[in-house]
Image (tube, grey):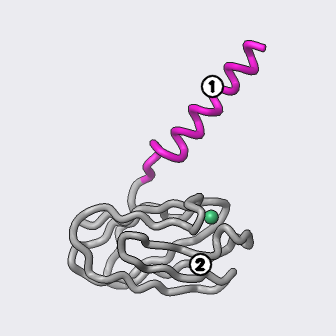
């Protein structure tokens, strides 16, 4: 019983760490844009470092067939795009002020962040 509880606590800890605390290094986006793979519940890369006040394009390649991955939303920018499996979908991002902007699937299971600086 104790073992079960310990495993449970570790599992919860891992989930908290994975979904809220873990912050992989940001990929730097240049004028050529960047490609983001949508697979296994994660955007790769999930953190994109962008220059402020500069429009950039992000190409999404969806490899996940589940309907969860079908949309990508940038709520703060009022941008959304439908993603087709195995097809590159280009999303043009406008010039943005400095700050952090989230992008997610429609259920917010896939999560990414734009770091504009
Ligand atoms: Cu989803």
Observer-nearest residue: 37 or 84?
84
Q: Do the CB atoms of the residues marked 2 and 1 lie less than 8 Å apart?
A: no
Number of other residues with Cα within 10 Å of mark 1, as a class: few under 14, some 14 to 19, many 20 or more: few
* Residue 8 vertical placement versus 35 (above, below): above
* Residue 2 vertical placement versus 105 (above, below): above
Magenta-drawn stretch, dominant element (helix, strand or loop): helix
**Residue at 49 percent of width and 64 percent of height:** 45
Quarter of the image where one finds residue 30: bottom left
Any magenta on residue 99? no
Name the mark on residue 61: 2
Labels 2 and 1: the sequence-earlier one: 1
* Residue 80 vertical placement versus 108 (above, below): below
Direction from residue 27 to residue 14 in the image, left or right? right
Residue extending furthest toward the top: 2
Name the mark on residue 9: 1
**Residue at 69 percent of width and 80 percent of height:** 85
**Residue at 36 percent of width and 70 percent of height:** 76
**Label 2: element kind:** strand
Q: Position of residue 90 (x, y in %)?
A: 49, 86
- The segment highlighted magenta reads 1-24
Any magenta on residue 11? yes
Quarter of the image where one finds residue 37: bottom right
Number of other residues with Cα within 10 Å of mark 2, as a class: few under 14, some 14 to 19, many 20 or more: many
Quarter of the image where one finds residue 38: bottom right
Labels 2, 1: front one: 1
Q: Position of residue 5 (x, y in %)?
A: 70, 20
| Screen quadrant of the N terminus | top right
Name the mark on residue 84: none
């Amino acid at each position: 019983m104790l073992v079960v509880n310990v495993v449970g606590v570790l599992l919860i800890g891992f989930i908290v760490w994975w979904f809220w605390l873990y912050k992989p290094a940001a990929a730097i986006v240049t004028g050529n844009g960047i490609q983001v793979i949508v697979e296994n519940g994660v955007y790769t890369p999930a953190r994109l470092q962008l220059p402020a006040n500069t429009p950039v394009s992000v190409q999404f390649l969806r490899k996940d067939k589940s309907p969860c991955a079908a949309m990508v939303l940038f709520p703060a920018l009022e941008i959304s795009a439908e993603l087709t499996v195995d097809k590159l979908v280009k999303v043009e991002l406008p010039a943005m002020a400095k700050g952090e902007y989230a992008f997610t699937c429609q259920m917010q299971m896939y999560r990414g962040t734009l770091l504009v600086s």
